[in-house]
């Protein structure tokens, strides 16, 4: 099978961690060229340590590059109420032996995309600062990007009534990305709230007997409690996992091609993704917008992936 080249750009993050686990599974047939980190759920330093910890747990030999310290224009905003002080509270992983590379994430993205023989897919699951910086610094990379598969936005918000966290944190960068002309596949809250890891799912995965499944179970317990306390949900929506699951099995999802604009000026709507579902703007679609997911299949495949880590380790 063809190995799709990907760069995972993230702020781990409980659900980012799950996205990495899915992408790194042998079943995904992805060629992960690197993991880049960005300021988001917590500081870029903490997110980078978490990425390194995940690589060690998975025995994943992929370089990790530390990226942008703060959003392009406004000051940083973080989400410890959802992800804890470390950004990945819950499971206790050892401090990593592995260190991040010296090169900055943005330069790694530019160099890697430029020099790649085949096109590269970028998979951002945090604020879009690194991706926007790369596109601004080296616009010529656009021709060698297959697709930007991102988690962000939606037709409603979770950070403000109008805005989802990843887009709100750096809406200016999101604007650069959505207006870049590179094909964008968007997993927003409309679809990610269809995969809530409730108690039934948590109990099901807790039965799988290997270190990766144990880690995921502990993530889901902490994340679920945070979502229960904060939003009254039955568990945590594993937002970022949708990106990796799509790369593995695109037909799990249903999409609509739409035009999306990013709001950067509104008093109450800063960071909103204005999703033109009815085509009222008359603007050309710039986004493949995920509307729904086959959730039973999603959970089944994720379970198979977790079980498969028994044999892979
Ligand atoms: C997004 O924000 C972060 O807290 C999650 O990791 C996810 O990427 C959901 O709004
Ligand atoms: Ca994230």
Image (cartoon, helix red, strand yellow):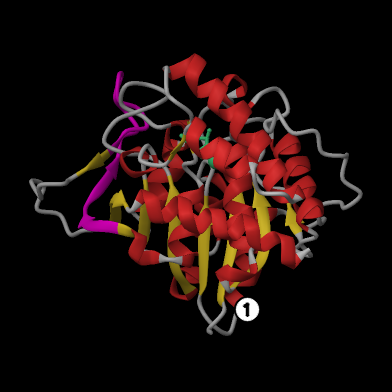
For residue 218, side relative to residue 8 (left or right): right
Magenta stretch?
A: 254-273
Instruction: Give the image quarter of residue 310.
Output: bottom right
Residue under label 1, please give it: 115
Q: Is residue 82 visible?
A: yes
For residue 209, side relative to residue 76 (left or right): right
Q: In this rendered view, identify the residue nearer to me: 37 or 170.
A: 37
Q: Residue 199, image x and y in percent?
A: 51, 30
Going by the picture, which residue comes out furthest to the right? 97
Q: Residue 29, image x and y in percent?
A: 58, 74
Where 293 sits versus 221, above or below?
below
Binning the other alpha carbons within 10 Å of mark 1 as few (below 14), some (14 to 19) or many (20 upward) gives few
For residue 308, side relative to residue 74 (left or right): right
Residue at horizontal 57%, vertical 36%?
A: 203
Look at the numbered disc 1 and give the secondary structure of its residue: helix
In magenta segment, residue 275: no
Residue at horizontal 43%, vertical 54%?
A: 298
In magenta segment, residue 264: yes
Q: Residue 94, image x and y in percent?
A: 87, 39
Q: How many marks?
A: 1
Where, quadrant-wise, is the C terminus in this rendering?
Answer: bottom right
Residue at horizontal 44%, vertical 25%?
A: 234
Q: Is residue 11 visible?
A: no
């Amino acid at each position: 099978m063809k190995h799709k080249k990907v760069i995972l750009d993230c702020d781990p993050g409980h659900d980012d961690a799950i996205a990495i686990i899915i992408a790194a599974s042998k079943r995904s047939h992805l060629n992960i060229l690197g993991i880049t980190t960005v300021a988001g759920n917590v500081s870029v330093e903490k997110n980078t340590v978490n990425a390194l910890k995940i690589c060690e747990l998975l025995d994943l030999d992929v370089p990790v590059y530390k990226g942008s310290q703060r959003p392009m224009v406004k000051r940083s905003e973080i989400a410890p109420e959802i992800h804890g002080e470390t950004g990945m509270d819950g499971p206790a992983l050892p401090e990593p032996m592995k260190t991040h590379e010296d090169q900055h994430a943005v330069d790694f993205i530019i160099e890697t995309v430029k020099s790649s023989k085949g096109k590269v897919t970028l998979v951002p699951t945090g604020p879009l600062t690194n991706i926007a910086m790369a596109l601004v610094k080296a616009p010529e990379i656009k021709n060698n990007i297959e697709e930007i598969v991102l988690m962000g936005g939606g037709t409603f918000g979770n950070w403000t009534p109008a805005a989802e966290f990843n887009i709100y944190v750096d809406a200016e960068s999101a604007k650069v990305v959505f207006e870049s002309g590179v094909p964008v596949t968007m997993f927003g809250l409309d679809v990610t709230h269809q995969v809530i890891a409730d108690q039934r799912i948590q109990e099901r995965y807790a039965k799988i007997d290997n270190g990766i499944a144990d880690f995921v179970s502990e993530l889901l317990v902490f994340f679920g409690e945070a979502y229960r306390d904060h939003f009254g949900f039955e568990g945590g929506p594993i937002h970022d996992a949708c990106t990796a699951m799509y790369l593995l099995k695109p037909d799990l999802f249903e999409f609509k091609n739409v035009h999306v604009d990013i709001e950067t000026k509104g008093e109450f709507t800063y960071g909103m993704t204005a999703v033109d579902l009815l085509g009222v703007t008359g603007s050309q679609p710039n986004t493949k917008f995920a509307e729904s997911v086959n959730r039973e299949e999603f959970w089944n495949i994720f379970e198979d992936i977790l079980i498969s880590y028994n044999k892979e380790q």
